Image: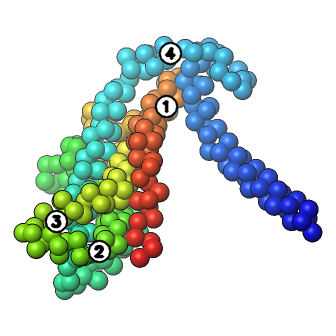
């Protein structure tokens, strides 16, 4: 009986890890292919290879020198950081108000926040185009950032509210006895405790801003305002070599990976914040 249970346990482990390994291979294969292609000379494209045979870094030099790639990269950084900063500031204040204060239409406001998540960007991009033209904001960084904040703000608010709900109000009441205002209690007590949730919200907002495609494509026209995603899609033509395009793809995925690695220890705790309340 023990041998049967042991064999069954081993079988379950083998199946589980086989599925995990296959999933990792499928997930990493496109990235691996992009890296190999980005290091391959143009005349060697199409060769079958399982491992890198060439390290032609000149592809990156040519990409930077003959395309507006640095302009695309700068715009993406501005969109990602702008979206993250605006989203975090607004989300912290909104989540704290929803968590600590009882006011009229509070439930309706939370339902509205949830409803925002299900509105496709394609539905509102046309009205935004008209508004940006009439207000003189068309082809500016701020119009894309504001549009991305409106699209990205729902999840951070709900995430932070769940974490704030799990923090005892007694801490703030004790601080109030010592003369702390609500704002001081938020800054000095709540936010340090909420670092995992705040870091997670920042990372998710950064990813949203970095992946911006529809808004930069519709609401901007100059090369200096175009994001990496839009710029790379415009490079896919009969002129741009594929090794250049793959080099741009590698450059586009590096910043999100770095942000994820830096915030990794907070992400799991942040995403499950408040779930045990």
Distance from label 1 to label 4 (Cα)? 12 Å
Residue at (34, 32) in percent of width and height: 73
Residue at (35, 48) in percent of width and height: 206
Q: Which residue is most to the left?
A: 179
Q: What residue is shown with label 3?
A: 185
Residue 202 in view in this figure = yes
Q: Position of residue 81 (x, y in %)?
A: 28, 44
Viewer-closest of 170 and 7? 170
Q: What residue is shown with label 4?
A: 57
Q: Nearer the viewer, mark 4 or mark 3?
A: 3
Which element carries disc 4, helix, strand or loop? loop
Q: Which mark is residue 119?
A: none
Which element carries disc 3, helix, strand or loop? helix
Do the numbered discs 3 and 1 sit on residues whose CB atoms are within 8 Å?
Answer: no
Q: Give the side of residue 86 with respect to residue 256, left or right.
A: left
Mark found first going from the N terminus, 4 or 2: 4
Q: Is residue 226 above or below residue 128?
A: above
Distance from label 3 to label 1 (Cα)? 43 Å
Quadrant (top left, top right, bottom left, bottom right) of the C terminus = bottom left
Q: Which mark is residue 250?
A: 1
Viewer-closest of 138 and 10? 10
Residue at (32, 56) in percent of width and height: 195
């Amino acid at each position: 009986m023990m041998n049967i249970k042991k064999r069954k346990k081993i079988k379950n482990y083998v199946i589980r890890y086989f599925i995990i390994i296959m999933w990792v291979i499928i997930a990493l294969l496109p990235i691996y292919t992009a890296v190999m292609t980005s290091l391959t000379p143009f005349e060697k494209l199409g060769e079958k290879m399982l491992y890198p045979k060439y390290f032609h870094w000149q592809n990156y030099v040519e990409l930077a020198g003959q395309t507006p790639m640095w302009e695309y990269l700068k715009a993406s950084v501005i969109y990602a950081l702008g979206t993250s900063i605006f989203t975090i500031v607004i989300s912290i204040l909104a989540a704290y108000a929803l968590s600590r204060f009882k006011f009229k239409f509070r439930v309706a406001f939370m339902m509205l926040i949830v409803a925002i998540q299900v509105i496709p960007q394609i539905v509102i991009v046309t009205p935004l185009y008209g508004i940006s033209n009439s207000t003189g904001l068309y082809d500016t960084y701020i119009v894309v950032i504001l549009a991305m904040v409106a699209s990205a703000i729902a999840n951070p608010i709900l995430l932070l509210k769940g974490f704030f709900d799990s923090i005892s109000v007694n801490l703030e009441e004790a601080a109030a006895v010592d003369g702390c205002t609500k704002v001081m209690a938020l800054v000095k007590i709540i936010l340090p405790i909420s670092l995992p949730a705040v870091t997670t919200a920042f990372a998710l907002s950064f990813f949203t801003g970095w992946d911006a495609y529809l808004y930069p494509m519709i609401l901007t026209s100059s090369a200096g305002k175009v994001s990496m995603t839009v710029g790379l899609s415009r490079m896919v033509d009969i002129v741009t070599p594929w090794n250049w395009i793959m080099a741009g793809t590698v450059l586009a995925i590096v910043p999100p990976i770095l942000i994820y690695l830096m915030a990794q220890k907070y992400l799991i705790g942040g995403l499950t914040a408040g779930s045990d309340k």
